[in-house]
Amino acid sequence: MTGTTTICAISTPPGTGGIATARISGPDAFEIVGKIWQGKSLDSLPSHTVHLGTIVDPADDDQPLDTAVATLFRAPRSFTGEDTVELTVHGSRWIQRQLINLLIRQGATLAEPGEFTRRALVNGRLDLAEAEAVGDMIAASSRAAQRIALSHLRGHYSQNLGRLRDRLLELSALVELELDFSEEDVEFADRQRLLQLAREIHSSVTALANSFSTGQALKEGIPVAIVGATNAGKSTILNRLLGEEKAIVSDIHGTTRDIIEDTVEINDTLFRFIDTAGLRLTSDPIENLGIDRSLKSAAAAAIILWVIDPADPRGLADTWSRIESQITPQTKILAAINKADTGAPAPALPDRIDATVTLSALTDATIRPLTDALSALALPAELTPDLTVTNARHYQALLLAGQAIERAIDGLTANLPGDLLAQDLRETAAHLASITSPITTPDLLTHIFSHFCIGK
């Protein structure tokens, strides 16, 4: 299909807007567009130029459809690597439908989801990791997610993987060379040097795999569970963070009985806040069900925002005993000592707390220190986009590569024969290559690009 047909689709978001852009790509792109174009002949115009003309219907005596702007990209200097024309018209839905119908009647085929990007991959304009970054770029919902996607799209992530594979090839070559001269009992590299190199590769692969939790959280929103005793001010703080009255606020204990969840971007990072039922001893079965859900949310959160009423020491102690059983070494805990306007003294807190802020949820003025503290806990001090993994497929490949190189390390430590070491090194290289290489099954490519929009 790729390279033999000419495809078309609307590349701008569906619906009515000021303008809409149709993309046409393939060997007959200029010929097909030329049949419905009135203006300068496209055949004689250079690549990367923009021209004004009119879209007409040749089957209706060249009846005009709309004034249009044509942007020309000649192969191989285009996104897909093929001849490509982008037609920009007014954003009427009817005009968009008629334009696509005109193109199809002239011989174009409606594009499949992600087909333009897939052609860019097949034609060598992008590797697989860069192609997947296109989808991440479109879906980016925060500045941090956009930075990572842009870095991957520009090839920085692929270049890091390439350097890792180069070191792996160096290790593999030395082992394979010994195999070629095994009968002569020749050793081309000291085993300790090989072991050191394998450990360095394992460390790099593991660091990339470990970055997935951060990368995934940045894409979907860093989960923050807001927990605390009843009437500590959890729902009020959620409403302040979201800038709207999302949760019901009441002086009645146990008002929040179910999970309330929403996302908001703070300091370029997307957070997913989960307001939970207040933690207390109660005989109400419905409220107890909400408390159980609260504890499960705390266990799954990257950050626990523990809201504390300084005038309620019993609630503080009871809440901490429940939180403590749910946290992991990776969980960050931000203690928010609320109701500063009451003048109650700050309570003593457990050593496990990562950060503390004092605020009054009744005013907006004290929310900024809270949001700054959340941002500081959410991300590493210096986010490195080209070393941050956001794709589950890449994460799985890195885990498999880590297991394979770990077997090679064990083999080098135990002084196993070179043929066994070589097999583990080949597996490591294959798993790393699967992240960027387009040499994969058609079913996998279809699955990857099925999540793209039609016009991309």
Image (tube, rainbow, N blue to C red):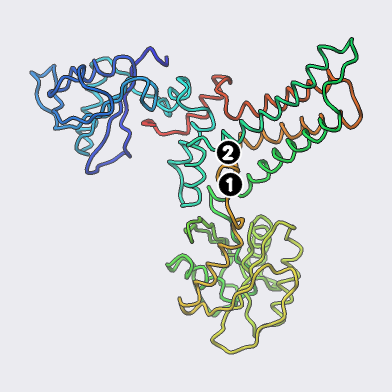
Name the residue nearer the viewer: 376 or 399.
376
Left/right of residue 22 with respect to residue 230 in the rendered view: left
Identify residue for label 1. Answer: 215
Q: Is residue 163 above or below residue 266?
A: above
Cβ–Cβ under 8 Å for marks 1 and 2: yes
Amino acid under disc 2: Asn
Q: Quadrant of the N terminus?
A: top left
Secondary structure at badge 2 equals: loop
How many residues crowd mark 2 within 10 Å: few (<14), some (14–19), many (20+)?
some
* Residue 365 on image: x %, y %: 46, 77
Picture residue at 51% right of the left edge, 35% below the top: 155
Place of residue 378 in the rendered image (x, y in percent of width and height, measured from the top left): 59, 58
Structural crowding at the residue carrying mark 1, measured as other residues with C-alpha within 10 Å and reported as few (<14), some (14–19) or many (≥20): many
* Above/below status of 297 relative to 173: below
Instruction: Determine whether, in the image, residue 385 is placed left or right of residue 143.
Output: right
Residue at x 23% of width, y 34% of height: 88
Q: Nearer the viewer, residue 74 or 303?
A: 74
- Residue lying furthest top in this view? 183
Residue 302: which quarter of the image?
bottom right
Name above or below for residue 447 compared with residue 307: above
On the image, which quarter does residue 330 sit in? bottom right
The residue to which callout 2 is attached is 391
Q: CA distance from mark 1 to mark 2?
A: 8 Å
